[in-house]
Image: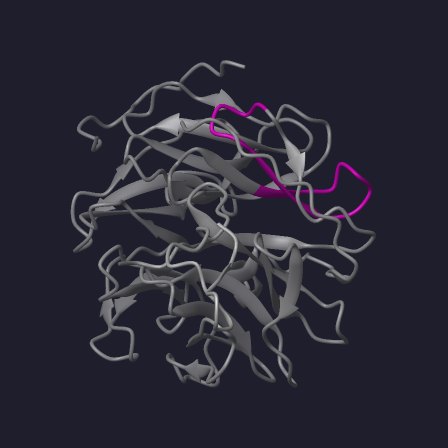
């Protein structure tokens, strides 16, 4: 029998332990279709300074230096319990090289993505007996419970590219299913309806499709990636890895999905084209590599790994090269999301 713990198969085993005294090592790397055919067979793995007026105080330069960006982002959001018993959200900003604690209270917070305009964060929060989907301002203020069902597990929020909808996972019907709602928690629509588990949705860049995880064609608890239209129609299977697949994330150019898979031994980060071809191991490391997420410009992928003896946030080029530790501390830093540059 499945338990409600299935909802957090990606995060229930995480033991966060802090993120103080970050040592930042930032390197800028060179930059980096919609599925039309269902894959039915396994695919092969391939491995100016201020100026002074003569009789006045100095004035500001009219063209100030641009804000430092990495991969088109201002920073990395991640989760940690370094500040106490509960898991909280922290923001590592590239301009300062410092991590700021965004949340603090009597509840756990798990990271979710920023809204497309960068002004809000979607997150998974926890009550006494269940989890919920919420939003807060980008500085961590004014967290709001959107799903507001105290006896139901909700989680895995994903913002639509136009910012008008949030996809999420809920057990309100008895098992994990994919739902959508507006950013105020209204107009809730169920997209999947299957006796197995469907969860962890992610939107295509044009907002017309949603990728998600399901064990509908596998042994219970063994997940593959599926794609459906944004209204829940035309469900088709994408991955046939023979392993257990998690955390799909669509690339900004819409051509590729990156995800975590356990095929043999530990988890690795893989990429696959949206037609199911070109399955590639990007990390190729004996450690655990989890939670990949594309940078806004598609040139980089952030992920968490325990290759240094504890969980750290790394970045790599989109092809898996140039893997660099961003957080580089003695505690655990996990579940990254990119903090996008401000919109015009």
Question: Which contiguous range is marked in magenta?
Answer: 303-321
Q: Magenta stretch: residue 140 in it?
A: no
Residue 270 shows up from this direction: yes
Q: Residue at x 19, y 52 (%)?
A: 230
Q: Residue at x 16, y 56 (%)?
A: 231
Query: Does 250 sit above or below residue 233?
Result: above
Query: Does 84 sit above or below residue 115?
Result: below
Q: Position of residue 307 (x, y in %)?
A: 75, 36
Q: Magenta stretch: residue 309 in it?
A: yes
Q: Position of residue 58 (x, y in %)?
A: 51, 67
- 310 to the left or right of 103: right
Q: Position of residue 158 (x, y in %)?
A: 37, 59
Q: In which quadrant is the C terminus drawn?
A: bottom left
Residue 196 shows up from this direction: no
Seen from the viewer's position, the closer of residues 52 and 65 is: 52
Query: Does 271 sit above or below residue 9?
Result: above
- 53 to the left or right of 192: right
Seen from the viewer's position, the closer of residues 139 and 259 is: 139
Q: Residue at x 68, y 33 (%)?
A: 266
Seen from the viewer's position, the closer of residues 87 and 6 is: 87
């Amino acid at each position: 029998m499945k338990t409600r713990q299935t909802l957090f198969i990606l995060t229930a085993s995480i033991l966060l332990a802090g993120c103080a005294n970050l040592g930042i090592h930032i390197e800028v790397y060179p930059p980096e279709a919609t599925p039309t055919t269902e894959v039915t067979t396994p695919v092969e793995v391939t491995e100016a300074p201020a100026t002074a007026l003569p009789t006045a105080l100095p004035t500001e330069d009219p063209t100030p230096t641009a804000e430092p960006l990495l991969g088109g982002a201002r920073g990395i959001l991640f989760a940690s319990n370094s500040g106490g018993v509960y898991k909280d959200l922290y923001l590592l900003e590239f301009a300062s090289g410092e991590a700021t604690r965004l949340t603090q209270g009597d509840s756990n917070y798990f990271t979710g993505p920023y809204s497309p305009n960068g002004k809000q964060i979607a997150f998974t929060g926890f009550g006494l007996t269940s989890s919920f989907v919420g939003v807060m301002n980008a500085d961590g203020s004014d967290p709001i419970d959107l799903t507001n069902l105290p006896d139901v597990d909700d989680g895995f929020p994903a913002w639509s590219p136009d910012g008008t909808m949030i996809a999420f996972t809920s057990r309100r019907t008895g098992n994990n299913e994919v739902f959508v709602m507006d950013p105020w928690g209204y107009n809730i629509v169920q997209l999947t309806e299957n006796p197995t588990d469907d969860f962890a949705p992610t939107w295509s860049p044009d907002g017309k499709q949603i990728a998600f995880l399901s064990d509908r064609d596998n042994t219970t608890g063994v997940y593959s990636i599926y794609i459906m239209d944004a209204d829940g129609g035309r469900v088709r299977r994408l991955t046939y890895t023979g392993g257990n697949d998690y955390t799909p994330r669509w690339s900004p150019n819409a051509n590729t999905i990156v995800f975590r898979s356990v095929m043999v031994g530990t988890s690795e980060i893989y990429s696959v084209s949206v037609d199911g071809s070109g399955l590639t191991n990007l990390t190729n490391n004996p450690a655990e590599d989890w939670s990949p997420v594309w940078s806004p410009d598609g040139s980089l992928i952030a992920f968490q790994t325990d290759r240094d003896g504890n969980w750290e946030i790394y970045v790599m080029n989109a092809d898996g090269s140039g893997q660099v530790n961003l957080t580089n501390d003695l505690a655990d830093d996990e579940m990254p999301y990119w903090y996008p540059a401000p919109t015009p």
